[in-house]
Amino acid sequence: MTKPLLSIKNLTIDYIGETADFRAVDDVSFDVAHGEVFGLAGESGCGKSTIAFAISRLHKPPALIRNGQILLEGRDVLGLDPRELRSFRWREVAMVFQSAMNSLNPVLRVEAQFYDVLRTHQGMNRSQARERTAEMLRLVDIPPDRMRDYPHQFSGGMRQRIVIAICLALNPKIVVMDEPTTALDVVVQREILQRINELRKTFGFSVLFITHDLGLMVQFCDRIGIMLAGKLVEQNSAGNIYTKPQHDYTRKLWASFPSLHGARLMEVAAS
Ligand code: ADP
Ligand code: MG
């Protein structure tokens, strides 16, 4: 097997409490290959976001990493110093949250927000940044002349695509997406995910995709990990996780899933 891009080994994370600690992530190990879309599924509170934050080195107290390793191309992510971290975030790992579209600065034109990132991380001047911004906006189906607009002049779906375009502008190796489209309507969700999939084929980045929507996950991911109370209880291909679930809990998750999606998922699993 070729070397994985991202390797999580025996990751254990506690939230430190006044009287007791809470184990949110319990001895979790998985790999994400170059160019792969790996999904993390499981009910609310099972530890998905805690893992996403640790991979991006965005975790902070009371979260404490008790044990384990996070390796990106063999490099120890948990050992990076503050200077190394600045280039690691954005250039190596980009993160898109559910509320990312609200993280755009309301008083700055879209153009200025791209410029900020491109100048800081790639030393671009204004005209170089403008060119790159136009290219990135085109990739997410936003007319480049709209870079002069402010965030409030765009719909929620467009704002989320702008954030994704900013994230991809520095060519990260992996994009961690934590419920990236949950706040959007179903049609917009699918459009965005399809676009990300096409971009992934062009640029070759990997995706760690987190959602509670198993139907969406099966259609979008290569492999899926199922989490239950901090533990990764199953890892399987997207097809098998529906047709041949290994763990009882995976079967229960499917059983609780609206049957409406069933026929569609059978098609996906069969394809
Ligand atoms: P998910 O993303 O799967 O919904 P989280 O990773 O957000 O789950 O949370 C995992 C568990 O850790 C939950 O039980 C949650 O209550 C707990 N948790 C999350 N953040 C904190 C925090 N800052 N302090 C204490 N406990 C937390
Ligand atoms: Mg979460």
Image (cartoon, rainbow, N blue to C red):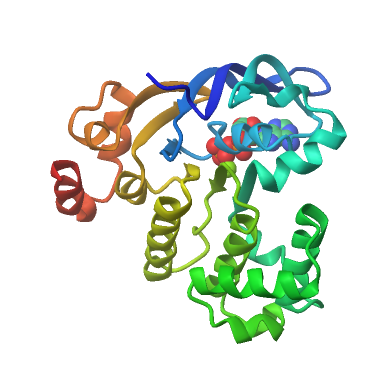
As rendered, which of 175 and 155 lies closer to the eye? 175
Q: Which residue shows up at 14% across the image and 49% down it?
A: 267
**Is 72 displayed left or right of 63 in the figure?**
left
Q: Residue at x 46, y 38 (%)?
A: 43
Question: Would residue 149 be seen by someone viewing this image from the given angle?
Answer: no
Give 39 or 18, whichever is nearer the viewer.
39
Q: Say which quadrant the N terminus sits in.
A: top left
Q: Is residue 137 above or below residue 88?
A: below
Percent from the top left, x then y, of residue 93? 63, 42
Identify the residue shown where x is 29% and y is 37%. 238
Q: Is residue 126 visible?
A: yes
Q: Position of 68 compared to 127: left or right?
A: left
Q: Position of residue 233 (x, y in %)?
A: 41, 21
Quadrant where the image shows the C terminus: top left
How far across and down, in percent of the image, does residue 158 sit?
55, 74
Does 226 appear above or below 26? below
Residue drawn where x is 66% and y is 23% of the image: 75
- Place residue 256 in its image quadrant: top left
